[in-house]
Image: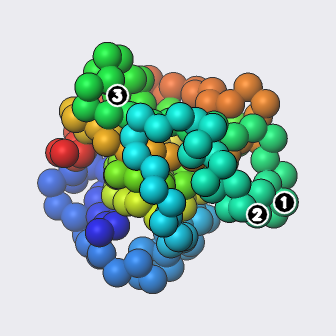
Amino acid sequence: MSELRVFADDSPGEATIRSEDHEELAYLLSAQRIRFERWSAQAAVVAGDSTDKILAEYQVDIDRLIAADGYQTVDVVSMTADHPDKAKLRQKFLEEHTHSEDEVRFFVAGQGLFSLHIADSVYEVLCQKGDLISIPANTPHWFDMGRNPHFVAIRLFNNPDGWVANYSGSKIATQFSRLEN
């Protein structure tokens, strides 16, 4: 089940808000300009499936997002517990960073934990299969896929180069929750 926990950025142990109600999550996140929606993810895809298969299964959803928001590039990130680079990739995503464009993810299998550093708060969003999240450009955040990842997410970009991070150098991400698989 998707979950939102909100913390003061100087109090990582005490959530001020906690909710698993999807409508409430969407409402609370929309106040921060974060799009959070529940989409159908009924296609039989699993981590490790080919990118072509995953994109073909969700082409209608991808086309809808491209038409609405003008995305130029689409790819798939698919991680399994036996991925040889899982530790290196996890560390890359765990450092606080921003992007010059919105970060859009549609989870079609598994789960991942986005942490968004907005003003003096940290919003931890546990995304599950069927969740679409769009984080506005220049929003400091980090992502945890866990030690034993299992997820497939379709990523959409306005930048033809795809995923480009601008790391903040802050160590705040080390103080907050990790995804335990």
Judged from the image, the secondary structure of the residue bearing numbered disc 1 is helix
Which residue is found at the position 45% from the left and 56% from the top?
Answer: 44
User: Cβ–Cβ below 8 Å for labels 2 and 1?
Assistant: yes
Q: Which image quarter holds the N terminus?
A: bottom left
Judged from the image, the secondary structure of the residue bearing numbered disc 2 is helix
Mark 3 vs mark 1, CA separation in Å: 31 Å
Q: Which image quarter holds the C terminus?
A: top left
- In the rendered structure, which amino acid carries the disc numbered 2? Arg
Crowd tier of the residue under label 1, counting other residues whose Cα lies within 10 Å: few below 14, some 14–19, many 20 or above: few
The residue singled out by tag 2 in the image is 64
- In the rendered structure, which amino acid carries the disc numbered 1? Ala
Q: Is residue 161 visible?
A: yes
Q: How far across and down, in percent of the image, does residue 108 sit? A: 47, 55
Which residue is found at the position 40% from the left and 46% from the top?
Answer: 46
The residue singled out by tag 3 in the image is 90
Query: Does label 3 or label 2 sit earlier along the sequence?
Result: 2
Which residue is found at the position 31% from the left and 16% from the top?
Answer: 84
The residue singled out by tag 1 in the image is 67
Viewer-side residue, 121 vs 73: 73
Q: How far across and down, in percent of the image, does residue 50 sit? A: 53, 34
Which image quarter: residue 124?
bottom left
Tell me the mark number nearer the camera, choosing from 3 and 2.
2
Q: How far across and down, in percent of the image, does residue 135 sit? A: 58, 53
Crowd tier of the residue under label 2, counting other residues whose Cα lies within 10 Å: few below 14, some 14–19, many 20 or above: few
Query: Does label 3 or label 1 sit earlier along the sequence?
Result: 1
Q: How far across and down, in percent of the image, does residue 56 sit? A: 66, 49
